[in-house]
Amino acid sequence: MNPSGIDFHCHLDLYPDHIRAFKHCEEEGVNILAVTTTPLAWPHNQELAAKSAFIRVGLGLHPQVVGDREGEIERFEKLVAQAQFIGEVGLDAGPRFYRSLAAQRRVFERVLRACSASGPKVLSIHAVRTVPEVLKMLKEWLPISKGLPILHWFSGTPAEVARAVDGGCWFSINPSMAASVNGLKIIDTIPIERMLTETDGPFAKDSNGVALQPGCVDGAVEIIARRKNLTEDMVRGQLLTNLEQVDRFVGYIGSYVRSPLLPESH
Ligand code: MN
């Protein structure tokens, strides 16, 4: 397993040995977005990533914790001007979190308004059973010059993909999406120019039930290659080009090591 893929949504600070997880990304050159679930975790994550050319840290307030932590939006708003990357944020209307949906909406609106006031930002967005509403809120509160939204582990319909693409959204593709027919249809519908890959580790597991390690996105690269009728090297080259474009949006300068075997895309 190639450990150095682009991992644009990973909870580095939730691995049992998170210091090692950060080191792993640095040593292997994993271009990663380390998302956080609460703004209280952001300063420590920033510290751990301070000297890294590979680790971006997202300022987040996860919709699944908003029921208990709505007040933390104030901390988010205080920190937002310092953050280029935002996540994990969004809405979750699944059965476990439906009860807090009203609070989630209040928080997500404030997140988007704060981003719009101090953007540009790149956002990693969770949208479970809420894609139409998330798209509507993005349109209302976040001008495209202020925010580049990336829908992570997308589980909506192919028709919703098309609407999201029209709305300027990008997508981070999780290896688990290859396991469902709907996931494959979604991958077919997303233009490769709007794709990145992700693990969502340590929540996402491999086929043996072991948490995916940061950067282990081979499964996603393989399925994108197959569905788009490209070689895996072509896909990796395109994803690196995409990453540079996303970083450029917020003026982040990363390290983009192209293996000599990888063709420049275009
Ligand atoms: Mn996540």
Image (cartoon, rainbow, N blue to C red):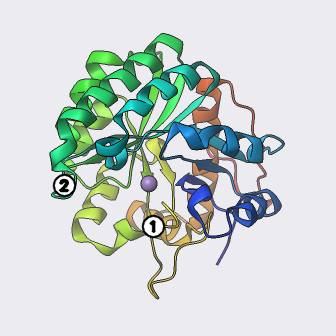
Image position, residue 113 (x, y; %): 38, 17
Residue nearest the observer in this picture, 221 or 226:
221
Please report contact status of discs 2 and 1: CB closer than 8 Å, yes or no: no
Q: Is residue 242 visible from the viewing direction of this image?
A: no
Rendering quarter of residue 223: bottom left
* Real-space Cα separation, disc 2 to disc 1, in angstroms: 17 Å
Q: Mark on residue 203?
A: 1
Give the tally of numbered discs. 2
In the rendered image, the quadrant that contains the C terminus is top right
Classify 137 as above or below 38: above
66 relative to 251, above or below: below
Tell which of 184 and 262 is nearer to you: 184
* Mark 2: few/some/many CA within 10 Å (<14, 14-19, 20+): some
For label 1, the crowd category at 10 Å Cα-Cα, with few meaning under 14, some 14 to 19 and many 20 or more, is: few
- Which quarter is ligand 1 in? bottom left
**Residue occupied by mark 2:** 94
For numbered disc 2, what is the local secondary structure?
loop
Farthest residue to the top: give it. 117
Q: Where is residue 51 in the image (x, y as percent from the top left)?
A: 84, 42
Q: Position of residue 224 (x, y in %)?
A: 44, 62
In the image, residue 137 above or below residue 160: above
Quadrant in which the N terminus appears: bottom right
Left or right, 71 with respect to 42, comes to left
Q: Which mark is residue 211?
A: none
Q: Left or right of 96: which side holds 58?
A: right
For image coordinates 70% across by 57% down, the residue present is: 30
Q: Does mark 1 have its CB less than 8 Å from ligand 1?
A: yes
Q: Where is residue 103 in the image (x, y as percent from the top left)?
A: 24, 34
Mark 1 residue element: loop
Residue pictured at 76% horizontal, 48% vertical: 48
Q: Report if the beta carbon of the residue with label 2 is closer than 8 angstroms to ligand 1.
A: no
